[in-house]
Amino acid sequence: MARFNEGCHNALRLHRELAERGLAVSERTVRRFVHRLRENAKPTTRPLVPKVREVTALILTHPDHRSESQQVFLKELRIRSQLLPSLDNQPRQDPLRDRFAAPGSPK
């Protein structure tokens, strides 16, 4: 049990180690026991990481059009990131307007 908790989940390896210690146990018994331990082991949960597309869309959304939950989420992102707070100081630009504007027209 200690070896399983240390990260050794290979039934064949555990069976060999038990045999080296002089324990007479079948490989099948060890395999079934390890299978039960794997089933009962709690899955490790990874923190949810937002997708780049979601964050980009949120940043580009006009502040007046963000929902309350989006505003809270963006605030949390700004706390975690060093780059995001600097975006508040940038003038809002419309990249499509700038790209397709007629030459000489005001931007």
Image: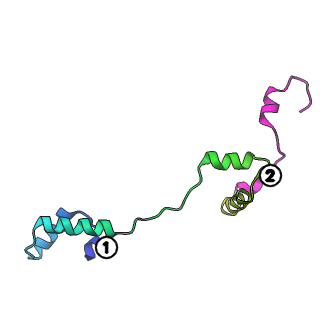
Q: Disc 1 or 2, which lies upstream in sequence?
A: 1
Residue 90: in magenta span: yes
In this view, 103 is above or below 29: above
Quarter of the rendering containing residue 29: bottom left
Name the residue located 86 percent from the left edge and 23 percent from the top edge: 102
Element under disc 2: helix
Q: Horizontal placement of 2 versus 52: left or right? A: left
How far from the left and from the top, in percent, is residue 38? Answer: 30, 66
Would you name the residue on which mark 2 appears? 63
Disc number for residue 5: 1
Q: Nearer the viewer, mark 1 or mark 2?
A: 2
Name the residue located 76 percent from the left edge and 54 percent from the top edge: 86
State which region is magenta. Answer: 83-107
Residue type at mark 2 is Pro
How far from the left and from the top, in percent, is residue 49? Answer: 56, 56
Q: Horizontal placement of 50 versus 45: left or right? A: right
In this view, 28 is above or below 62: below
